[in-house]
Amino acid sequence: MAQAVYLQTYGCQMNERDSEEILGMLGAQGYVVVDREDEADVILLNTCSVRAHAEERAFGKMGLMQKLKRERPSLVLGILGCMAKAQREDIFRRLPQVDLVAGPAEIYDLPDLLAGVAERRQQQQLGAGARVLAIDRKVRPLDRRPATDYRAGQVAAFVTIMEGCDKKCAYCIVPTTRGQEVSRPVDEILDEVQQLARAGYRQVTLLGQNVNSYGKRFPDGSGWVGPARRRQLLHLSAHPGEANARSGPPDGPRLADFPALLRAIDGKTSIDRVRFTTSHPFDAHEELFQAMAECRTVCEFLHLPVQSGSDHLLRAMRRGYTAEHYLGQITRLRELVPDVALSTDIIVGFPGETEADFEATCDLMERVRYDSAFVFKYSPRPGTEAAGWADDVPQPVKEHRNQAILALQERISREKLEATVGDDVEVLVEERNRRGQLTGKSRGNTTVVFDGADTLIGEMVGVRVARVTGTTMIGELAAGAAR
Ligand code: 5AD
Ligand code: SF4
């Protein structure tokens, strides 16, 4: 009988896409996907390690699943993703019933690994889990990517364009958990986007830990190394904006950078909307802003995490830019893409953060006036550089700064949102919400809610903003709507 698999995802959009790939692969192997743990033969958690809290949630959930396994010993339990790589065999110590621990670089090995679990369990009468550990790959072998395709949505799809991260931000565990950067070849991405467009998808979100360093290393070893080399190879400095994957530089037809990829998707596929995440200010250049301005399909939205507004902290975090440089980038972006919506990530309570550092962050936020922001209390991650430093901002101070930033951002978001009342926005309609209204996103990534027929799902429509609540626009279908 077919094995039933239940998969729960924690963490970022990269993880969500990995989970789709995992379900696609397992589906092709004959597994049936179920959405209830008690119906499953295999329970997998695709986990996140970015903060201690994310790990504790996954540990808690797996603890509950162990109880299920006591009632049903044939149940297979697996921990996948970043926490698998970060906590390694320690997971078996805390969760003795777990059968499989597999890191982010090992997702394409899963069918084999699950077969290995079944074998181990047949061979021995196990009182505990099978304890199969797979965490040693340094790079995800993108050339082993299976041909299967599984997507959670029907209108908007994720497309992974690169995996891993070569940066060394002092607080961040991702380079450890996700390994070295590797980019998917341009042609492969174009094929995937075009297939999605043909299948009726209207939007793709290009995913990577730092999409701006796309193209640095391809699976065959080609790519550019370092920004100077990249500019030289792509002949960027003389003619910004002209670099493209279509003509390609003479000495490397497979060389491309992120702006070139955006231009290629815009020019060569029939997808209607393109988004991307995440960007790093160190690698986001003029060419990116040019490409955003010139590519019709690329939405006017940039998530550009600043983390802090204090140069002293940015240096300690090893971010590679100053607040002034960052503000300069925002100014230039706004010159090229005047109505661009912006979001950011902020860490409060990083080691050594003084009241003055914190105020510098608030000041930067007032100057940028983001549309939205994600705020995180610093959480030391074992193995990172900052974990060796005293976590010296007291918890109540972190909490207070967290609340203050949230309140500041809430005010700015509200002011910006209220100013849109009366405007017409282009909405890609995604689904019906629980209240029976249609919902979708504006090009600037704001949720828009309005009344309309089911036939509009998957369509691009004009909506007039009537009022706003929280972070949502509430509107009416504009006259002559469907565009
Ligand atoms: N503590 C708190 N926040 C963190 N982030 C990454 N690592 C940590 C950490 N150790 C935040 C950063 C990043 C976002 C995804 O998570 O702001 O941009
Ligand atoms: Fe979490 Fe970062 Fe891993 Fe995404 S890449 S799952 S945010 S630790």
Image (tube, grey):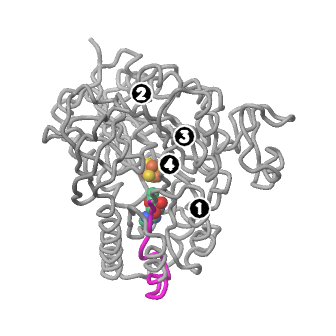
> Dot 4 lies on which element?
strand
Disc 4 to disc 3: CB gap under 8 Å:
no
> Dot 3 lies on which element?
loop
Of the numbered discs in the image, which one, if any, rests on residue 335?
Answer: 1
Q: Nearer the viewer, mark 4 or mark 2?
A: 2
Q: Which residue is mark 3?
A: 296
Q: Which residue is mark 2?
A: 201
The outermost residue toward the right is: 251
Q: Callout 2, which amino acid?
A: Tyr
Please state, as top left, top right, bottom left or bottom right, where the N terminus lies in the image.
top left
Q: Position of residue 50 (x, y in %)?
A: 43, 57
> Dot 1 lies on which element?
helix
The outermost residue toward the left is: 435
Span of residues in magenta: 343-359
The outermost residue toward the front is: 479
Marks 3 and 1, how far apart at CA: 17 Å
Please state, as top left, top right, bottom left or bottom right, where the C terminus lies in the image.
top left
Marks 4 and 2, how far apart at CA: 18 Å
Tell me which label, 3 or 1, sits earlier in the chain.
3
Q: Is residue 80 magenta?
A: no
Q: Callout 4, which amino acid?
A: Thr
Tell me which label, 2 or 1, sits earlier in the chain.
2
* Residue positioned 52% across, 66% down in the render: 306
Q: Nearer the viewer, mark 4 or mark 3?
A: 3
Marks 3 and 2, how far apart at CA: 17 Å
Q: Which residue is mark 4?
A: 277
